[in-house]
Amino acid sequence: MFGSTVYRLAPLLLFCVPITVEPHRNVCGVRFRNVCSMSMAKELITASRTINASPDRVWHAVSDLSAMGRRSPQCRKMLVLGSGTPRPGTTTVNLNRRGVLFWPTWSKVTAWEPAKTLEFRIPINGSRWRYDLVDNGDGTTTVTESRIVQGNTSAISRGLVAAFLGGNDTFEAELHRGIEQTLAGIAGDAEAAG
């Protein structure tokens, strides 16, 4: 049922700019806010955490992409395609969840610098997710997780967020809480490994 609704809504979401949807109108059983008056995505959503572990131990936790589903409240699964250590160009297939909603995405690793930086880009919405590690020189490491958007997310992403995920402000506040939860999971794994 959900899948058929998404397929019926896809043309509306792809061509949202010239179409006006009345506020709170039901379309295909979905109660829309005004999908075409979607707000801009924040350029940066970020949080940092100092972890009582070396950069190598923190990197081991951060770079374990298969653990993303255990740490993140939204990205429930991240499957690395191919074999060996990920590197720039590596593709992942991701399964996201919020309540009863599930949606797949895929990403490309854009930066992989051990004990320093991991970044991947989600082509369908244009966002980048980045982890920066800083050695504090006292046995601790500060890790910063960021969701970066240059310009705005794609029209289809904005439409889906507006229609199904409560709008940009609600969704981005949720992303910020999710970043903090993911960092707590990384800290727990890195500190337990020591």
Image: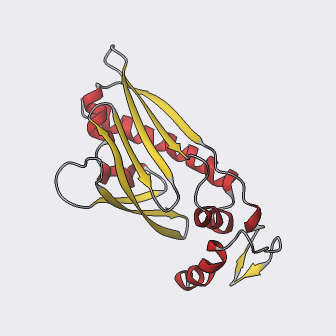
| Front residue of this view, candidates 100 and 38 | 38
Number of numbered labels in the structure image: 0
Compared with residue 37, is residue 138 higher up or lower down, i.e. above or below?
Answer: above
**x, y (%) of residue 30?**
69, 78
Quadrant occupied by the N terminus: bottom right
Vertical arrangement, residue 56 with respect to residue 74, above or below: above
The image quadrant that residue 99 belongs to is: bottom right
- Return the residue nearer the eye: 82 or 15: 15
Residue 161, given in percent of the width and then of the height, sits at: 63, 62
Q: Is residue 21 left or right of residue 114?
A: right
Residue found 51% across the figure and 40% down from its top: 180
Residue in the image at 56% along x and 82% along y = 7
Q: Residue furthest top?
A: 138
Specify how the rendered protein is coloured.
secondary structure
Residue furthest left as drawn: 84
Q: Name the residue rendered at 31%, 58% in the picture.
A: 91
Q: Quadrant of the C terminus?
A: top left
